[in-house]
Amino acid sequence: LFVGNEDFFFRGREYSPVSTRLDYFGLSHTWEGLEVSLAGSHQAENAATALAVLECLKELWGFPVEEEAVRKGLKSVSWPGRLEIASWQPLVVLDGAHNPYSAQALKTALEEVLPRRKTVLVFGAGQPHLHREMAEILWPMADAVVVTQSRHPRALDPARVSAECSDLARSLLVLPDYRKAFHEALLLAGKDGLVCVTGSLYLVGNIKAELEGARPDHEPLVQLPRRGEEQLPLFAPPPTT
């Protein structure tokens, strides 16, 4: 058994909306200045755990682990629906947090990597998610909450979620159609605000599919901004000026 902060250690160095930098002090290796292309301090912990697994593979079974491969792998990792910035203007963040632990990680990460701005949550939950516990963590940080539901058959009725959690929100709106909920959230946040879709991986998946135009019978939910004649990359930060 190898335990974090007992047998291997990590130190977060820098957090941005699109990456995390860390140092790793492991079972037999020290790798400093690593960059993982995921946002949030919790991703430093996740990266360190993955590196400890790699070390075990090498030490116990001779699996080769080269530093160049470690650095390249962490820098190129992709995890859709986890603090994924789907649009920069308006700022849209997709995060499939669906339990209290991941809700706290989302809250902390938003505070770490994105400057404070008007925040609107698009929130949906499924059974048997601990929606009240998640709402206690996330809803107070938002200026407004729009409760909706995914297309999944186990999605919770947003009216029930609203009734059980209404005391936690500054402003609350219930729109069962997630497309309408997302559009309303954009209006409430305004051009300089933040819309965060969370509470359910299925809801995040539905919104993500719409944003990427995966459903040919609908126009995309958000037309991403253009700079000159070229459209900004979907998952790239805005160009510096």
Image (cartoon, rainbow, N blue to C red):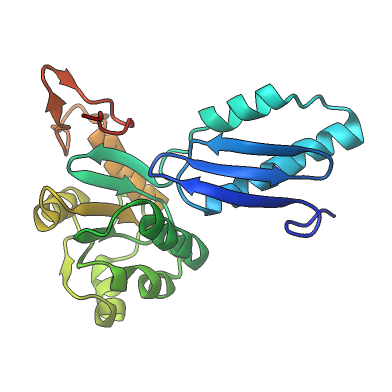
Task: Count the labels in the image.
Answer: 0
- In-front residue for pair 55/222: 55
Q: Is residue 149 left or right of residue 125?
A: left
Residue depicted at x 49% and y 46%: 14
Residue 34 in the image, given as x and y percentages of width and height: 60, 36
Task: Look at the image and tell me in which quarter the N terminus lies.
Answer: bottom right
Residue that appears at 72% across and 52% down: 9
Residue 148 visible, this angle: no
| Quarter location, residue 112 | bottom left
Residue 39 rendering spot, x and y as whole percentages: 45, 45
Q: Is residue 206 above or below residue 216?
A: below
Image coordinates of residue 231 in percent, x first then y, are 18, 22
The residue positioned farthest toward the front in the image shown: 241
Instruction: Pick out the residue farthest to the top.
Output: 229
Relative to 68, does residue 106 appear above or below in the rendering?
Answer: below
Q: Is residue 100 left or right of residue 190?
A: right
* Rendered residue at 30%/43% (across/down): 206
To which quarter of the image does residue 222 belong? Answer: top left
Place of residue 150 in the rendered image (x, y in percent of width and height, measured from the top left): 30, 52
